Image: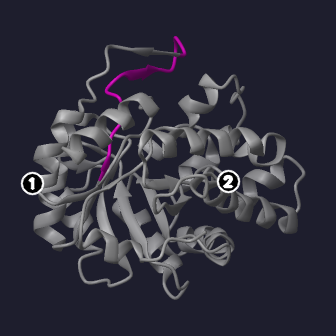
Amino acid sequence: MKPVRSLAAALAERVLVLDGGLSNQLEAQGCDLSDALWSARLLADGPQQIEAAHAAYARAGAQVLITSSYQATFEGFARRGTGRAEAARLLARSVELARAAGGRTEREIWVAASVGPYGAMLADGSEYRGRYGLTVGELARFHRPRVEALAEAGPDVLALETVPDADEAEALLRAVDGCGVPVWLSYTVEGRRTRAGQPLAEAFALAAGLDQVVAVGVNCCDPEDAGPAVEIAAAVTGKPVVVYPNSGERWDARARGWLGGATFDPSRTARWRADGARLIGGCCRVGPDRIAALAATLEE
């Protein structure tokens, strides 16, 4: 069942808790994600696992569930021999699974349909660099079909997330124009710049005057970088801020393992909230236990 209020209306009243990393929860459930489609493979091969992962976050206190469509694209599915009609059905299924998991609780649960960057389709890590060698127009044409398929499935918001480059943000904003669904825009950052190196103030300014954009912010970044980004996003746009960083551990591609300790600390949320954050959660390696702690902190 869809929530009674729009996401924008809810944000005007209170802070909402986002979920955490979907992939780490799926792995905790025993799923093998060693595939170019990553968690999106399970839309076809194990949808019950995706719904169970969403349900785990809903039980932990998440009020917004982000779908498993981050790495789901027509091009990626085509490489596995999946036709466009079936790919569109799988994209719609990502919204349906999150909606079904949210329906198990008595609380209002909003569904955010994930629209990942072009680099996620390449599955080569380039979503953390940007600068793909494509024009804004070419990127907009790539994103539009998936946006249309997800919008038709009826999510409460489209999450334009882990965007590494202001040029791709411009392309995504073009692609969602007229789709009839509100969006949030969330960059992946390093320090006070996008991963592609643009100043965050300039990157956030792209969304400042767009009514369709209900929140701006950052995700898939170090928790240390989240605080300054929240301040900049709020100051530049005057919009509610969305923030969901990683655990703080670092991925070593050579060793194929995580390094360092987790620095994600729910106590940071008080400062983020004071600076304008209204959607707060976690990304990679942030599981239901930390989301539960975050929800309890916000409740206090």
Q: Of all residues shown, which one is farthest toward the front?
A: 106
Which of the 4 quarters of the picture holds residue 262? top left
Label 2 with label 1: CB-CB less than 8 Å: no
Helix, strand or loop status at disc 2? loop
Q: CA distance from mark 2 to mark 1?
A: 35 Å
Image quarter where the N terminus lies is bottom right
State yes or no: residue 53 in magenta.
no
* The magenta segment: 243-256
Q: Is residue 163 left or right of residue 80?
A: left
The residue type indicated by label 2 comes to Ala
- The residue pinned by badge 1 equals 274
Q: Nearer the viewer, residue 139 or 20?
A: 20
Image quarter where the C terminus lies is top left
- The residue pinned by badge 2 equals 72
Q: Nearer the viewer, residue 195 or 52?
A: 52
Q: Residues within 10 Å of mark 1 (few under 14, many from 20)?
A: few
Q: Of all residues shown, which one is farthest toward the bottom?
A: 178
Residue 191 visible in rendering: no
Q: Nearer the viewer, residue 264 or 81?
A: 264
Tell me where residue 21 appears, x and y as whole percent. 48, 38
Residue sitting at x 60%, y 72%:
147
State yes or no: residue 249 in magenta.
yes
Residue sitting at x 26%, y 24%:
263
Q: Is residue 176 left or right of residue 229?
A: right
Looking at the rendered image, the disc whose residue lies closer to the viewer, 2 or 1, is: 1
Tell me where residue 219 appears, x and y as whole percent. 35, 47
Q: Is residue 254 left or right of residue 84?
A: left
Tell me where residue 88 appears, x and y as whole percent. 77, 66
Q: Earlier in the sequence, mark 2 or mark 1?
A: 2
- What is the chief secondary structure element of the magenta stretch? loop
